Amino acid sequence: MSNSDARKKPDIRLLFEPKTVAVIGASAQPGKIGYSICRNIKEGGYQGKLYPVNPKGGTIFGEKVFTSVADIPGEIDVASVTVPANLAFEAVKACADKGVKHIQVITSGFAEIGEADLENEMVQYAIDRGCRVLGPNIFGLFSASARFNSTFSAGTIPSGAVGILTQSGALGIAMIGKCALENIGLSAIVSMGNKADIDEADCLEYLIQQDLTKAILLYIEGIKGGDRFLQTLRAATKVKPVVVLKSGRSKRGAMAAASHTGSLAGTDEICDAILRQCGALRAETLQDAFNWCKCLKDAPLPKGERCVIVTNGGGVGVMATDACEKYGVELYDDQKVLAQAFDEATPDFGSTKNPVDITGAAGAKDYDLALAAPAKCPTMDSAIALYCETAVFNADNLVEMVRGTYKTYQAAGKPITYALVGGKTVAQAAEVLKEEQIPVYTEVYDAVSNMGALYTRYRMAQLRDDKIDEARIDLGAIEKTIDAVLADGRSFLLANEGQAVMRAAGVTIPGAKIAKSADECAKAAEAIGFPVVMKVVSRDILHKSDAGGVVLNLKSAGEVREAYERIMNNCRAYKKDAVIDGIEVVEMVKPGVDLIVGARKDGQMGPIIMVGMGGIYVEVMKDVAFRSANLSRGEAQRMLQSIRCYPMLAGARGQKPKDTASVVDHIIKLATIIKRVPRITDIEINPVVVYEQGCKAVDVRILIKK
Ligand code: ACO
C-alpha cells in the first residue's frame, strides 16, 4: 500500500459544504479571477468563513487578507488556487502543508498543454499529504446546499434541482447562463477540468445522497477510471435520472476531445452501449440534455407503454407520430376504447384514432375534455398535447388550459408534455408556462423527445438488473499458462496455450493434438475421429492460411500423412528459417451459427465484453454488441438479442433454435477471465460455433501484458 492509500481521504461532502474557504491569489482588482471568486463567495450568501490570501495583505470584500495560508488559524476545508501556473505548485504545497482538505486548482497550463508531469507531481504532493485536488484547469464549483459559489462566472447562479458535472470549463460557464435563461435551477455545478484527482465518480457519490439534486447532467469527453465511474453511475441512476452528454462521437470529434483534455476518447459505440447498461440517458444536444433534466426532475414516470397524442392539427399530429417512432414512444392503439374515450371531445370531421384530432375548431374546453380522458382511463399511460395557433382558440386561454390539464395529470401520476406551435402570443404563453416548470415546448419533436426520455427511464427501471454473474474458472491453471508464455518472452498465446486457458474456464473446444511427424499426426487423427483439420504451429507464422499451413477435411490416415508433407514444404517455402513447433491436428467442426465472443480491458471503460456475428466477415458486417464485463446472465442474454443476426440463433427459416444459454455461458466465462486475470488484456474466440445443444470455441486468441 502506498503512502497516499494509507491516508484517510477527506469526506467529499466538505468540498460541497465547506465551513472554511481560502482563496490563494485573492485580488482586490475587479476583472481578475481571484477577485471574481471572492465576490461570488461573498455575494452568493455563503455562511462559512472566507480567508483571502495575497502577499500584499489588506482587506478584500471586508475580509482581512492573510499574507500566507500557513497563518490562517484553524482548519481549511477548501482552498481555491488562482495564481499563475508558475506559482501554482508552490501554492498547492503551502495548502497541503497546512492540511487543507480540498484544493481547487483554477489555474490552467498543465496536462491540457502537455505539462502532465508537472501536474502529476503537484497533485501527488497534495494527495500524499491527505488532500484531494479538484482540477487543475477549472472554473470552480457551485453548491446550492451551502450557498457556496466558488466559480468565477458572472452573475448569480439560480438554485434548484439539477446537478451538473462538466469536463469543459467554457461550456460549463455557458451552461450556467443557459440554465438561467431556461429557468433551470442548479443544486450544484462542478468544473472537472483535467481530473487529476477528483473525478466524476467522487462528485456523483455526493450528488447521489444530496437531497436537493433531483436530476444529474454530465458533460464528458473522456472517462478515467472506467470501472469505478461505471459502478458509481449505475448506483446514481438507481436513485436519480442521469443525462449524459458525451462528445467525441465522430472520429474527428474524438480527436478534438483527445487533444482538448489530454485523454483519449474510446470507441463511441462501446461507450453508448455501456452508458445505457448503467441506466444513463445519453443526449445528443445540449438542448435535449437540458430539456430532459428539467422534465425528468419532477415528471412522474409512465406506468405503461400506451401513449396518446391529442392535437388540433393533422400536420403536427403526423409530425409527432414520426417523432414517436424516433424516440421510442409507443402509441395506444385500441380503436374501440379510443372512440369511446374521445367521442364527446371530437367533432364528426375529427378523428378519435391516435393521434386524436379534435380539429382546428377546438377551444380550451374541448382540450380540457379530450385531455381528461387519458388522465383517467386506466389503459392509457401518458399524453402528448399539441396545440396549433388557430383563429378559433383564444391564445389567452392557452395558459389556463395547460395549467389546468397539467395539474390533472400531476394528480393522476401520469406524464404529459406539450408542444405549442404558433406566433408571438403562443411563444409568450409557452414562456410563462416554462417559468412554472411545466414541460411545454414550441417544437413538436422536443415534446416527444422529452416523453421519449421518460419512457427510456421507465424501461431502464423495468429492466434494471444490478446482479453481476461470474463463472467458476481455474485461475491457478490460467496463471500458470501465462507464466510459461512470459518466460518464453511472448505477449500472445499459441493455439495450444489458448486452448489450455479455455479448458481452465470450462469452454468446450474441438478435440486437438500437436504432433511432430506424419505418423504422430495420423495417430492423433485416429484418436480424435475423422474428418480432421491440420494447422501449422509456429511463432514465426502468424497468418497460417497465407503460408499454406492449413489443410481442411482430411478423411483418412493416408490423407493426413500426405497433408503433413504438404504443410511442411509450404511453410519452408513461405519462410525458410521459420521455427515449426509441430502440426496441430484438430477435429473438423460441424457447421452451426458462427459467432464471435471477445473481451478486452478498455483504457476508459474498464473490462468490456463483446458478442457478434462471427467468421471471416466480422469486420465487414460489424454486427456486434458491447457491454461492461460487470454484467448478469440476463444482460448477456439481452446483449445477444440485440445483434442483427440473432434471428439465426432463435431459429429463422424453419431451423431449430440454437443453444443461446450456452452462448450466454461463454459471455460470462470470458467476462470472468478478463476481470479476474489481471495480465490478460484481450481474448477473442472466433468463431464460437453454436449448435442446438452447446457451442464449440474453434479459434482462440489471447494477448497478455508483458
Ligand atoms: N499567494 C497568493 N497570492 C499570490 C501569490 C501567492 N504566492 N503570488 C501572487 N499572488 C497574487 C497576485 O499578486 C495577484 O493579486 P493582485 O491582483 O493583488 O496583484 C493574484 O495572486 C493573481 O495573480 P496574477 O499574476 O495577477 O494572475 P492572474 O489573475 O492574471 O492569473 C490565473 C491567474 C487566473 C490562475 C491564470 O494563470 C489562469 O490560469 N487563467 C486561466 C484560468 C482558466 O481559464 N481555468 C479554466 C477554467 S475553464 C474555462 O475554460 C473557462
Image: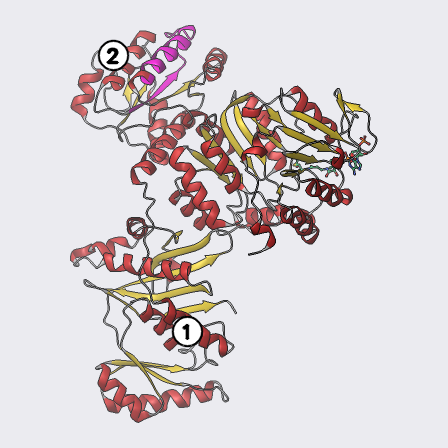
Give the magenta range. 382-410
Q: Examine the image and state in which quarter residue 173 appears.
A: top right
Please name the residue that numbered disc 1 is placed on: 480
Mark 1 or mark 2, earlier in chain: 2
Q: Is residue 150 visible?
A: no
Residue depicted at 77% across the width and 42% down the height: 87
Residue at image mark 2: 345
Foreground pick, 189 / 57: 57
Image check: 114 left or right of 387?
Answer: right
Residue 345 located left or right of residue 134: left
Query: Which class describes the residues within 10 Å of circle 2: few (<14), some (14-19), or many (20+)?
Result: many
Above/below status of 555 relative to 461:
below
**Closer-to-camera residue (628/646):** 628
Q: Is residue 393 magenta?
A: yes
Q: Position of residue 86 (x, y in %)?
A: 78, 45
Q: Residue at x 37, y 77 (%)?
A: 496
x%, y% of residue 135?
A: 63, 41
Would residue 481 be found to the left or right of residue 120 on screen? left
Q: Secondary structure at mark 2?
A: loop
- Are the residues flagged by discs 1 and 2 in contact, CB closer than 8 Å? no
Expressed as whole percent of the image width and height from the top left, the position of residue 676 reads 41, 60
39 or 6, nearer to the observer: 6
465 horizontally vs 256: left or right: left
**Amino acid, disc 2:** Ala
The residue furthest right is: 56
